[in-house]
Image (cartoon, rainbow, N blue to C red):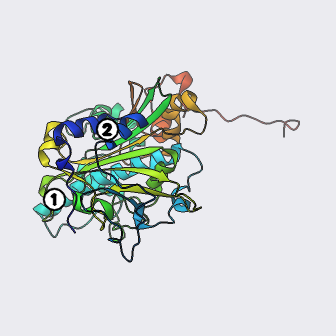
Amino acid sequence: MKTTNIADFIKPEAFLKQATEATTVRAITSLLAQFPIVDENIYAFDSSNPTNGWVEGKFHWIPLGKERGNAGRIKLATRPEGPIAERTINGMEALIELMRRLELLQNPNAPAPQSPREAVMRYFSLPPLDQIPKLQENPKGNIKGQKPQKYARELAKLLRVRVAYDKVSKEFAVSIEDDGIGQTPARMHETLLSLGSSDKGDKPYLIGLFGQGGSSTYAASEYSWCVSRRASQLLDGKPDGVGWTVAKHIYPKNRRDDFFAYLAASPTGEVPTLPPEAGEAIRFKNGSRFAHLGYNFAGGGSAVTKGLYQTLNHILFNPVLPFDLDVGGTLATIYGNGYRLSNATVKEKTRLDKYFEQQQLDAHSA
């Protein structure tokens, strides 16, 4: 059974631009209306016989991880900020993996870094971020000819978290974008859209292992879209292209087992594919983009998004890589609270790591 071709219904370049700019539920459902999609209550995915009920030439909803009972695992997060941090860590791993794979192209026998920090030092010449303030004070502490803070700030542009608020729909959208290794459309369902499936066990230079944390973003969203494109040097024999899909929460009629599903182009799970030219049209060379629409900040609303800078600095206390946070057009770089505690550029009266002299305790206070 052949894969349904998304280009049969739309102009790929214009569509990808619209898709990657969608920040509301209305915008994404409007895009989906262009395609022939089988109702989720008509096609029920069966892992033992996925072609049963599949309609040729149409898109279908397939459970994330091809697991109908996936809701319990996806709803694990207790706070909506945690999954955002998890997705950001996935982006850091994508950047490290890109550099590792490029290294192996040059030297197939190059030993693997034995930790994420070793990898970041090898590939980006970046020490732990909490050391940057001290290097900044050292006249000889430049990194690749730049002041450490400036170098780190430029590096942060490779990984971006954006939060947008739509005043009409009163919805939040959270997107996480990385310029890392990306994935081929043929393998997105096995990697980016899988649950608990991981190829990180033999890669000590990566951070996560179980392939689970970032998926909790689906539970906080009404819809999510994902696009990915593999770095051209690392296609591993697969064709170049941009994979694109949408995920949503499904509540089947007359059933209690709700689940999360994504839009698939074939019963084996492959996502809709756009040609490389579509990626070139929006300057999308490689990496992955996840956008979570109608994001539920647990009733905190704008108060939460205003505090997201502090929250992410707290959760990611000393991340291996910095990243940019854009909240409603206000841009800041996240280095973690470890960096903030050691930052000697903060005024003495407000330094978080300022020294307190020992205090003599008398018998009464003791």
Q: Nearer the viewer, residue 46 or 323?
A: 46
Marks 1, 2: nearer the viewer: 1
The picture quadrant where one finds residue 57 is: bottom left
Q: Which residue is mark 2?
A: 156
Of the two numbered discs 1 and 2 on the same chain, state the one appearing first in sequence: 2
Query: Does residue 37 appear in this view?
Result: yes
Q: Amino acid at mark 1?
A: Leu
Query: How far is the residue under mark 1 from the one under mark 2?
Result: 23 Å
Q: Residue furthest bottom?
A: 48
Is 242 rendered above or below residue 351? below
Residue 72 placement (x, y as % from top left) = 56, 61
Look at 38% across and 49% down and name the residue there: 320
Q: Is residue 284 left or right of residue 323?
A: left
Look at 72% across and 34% down and name the residue there: 359
Q: Which residue is mark 1?
A: 234
Query: Does residue 141 appear in this view?
Result: no
Q: Amino acid at mark 2?
A: Ala
Q: Nearer the viewer, residue 362 or 128?
A: 128
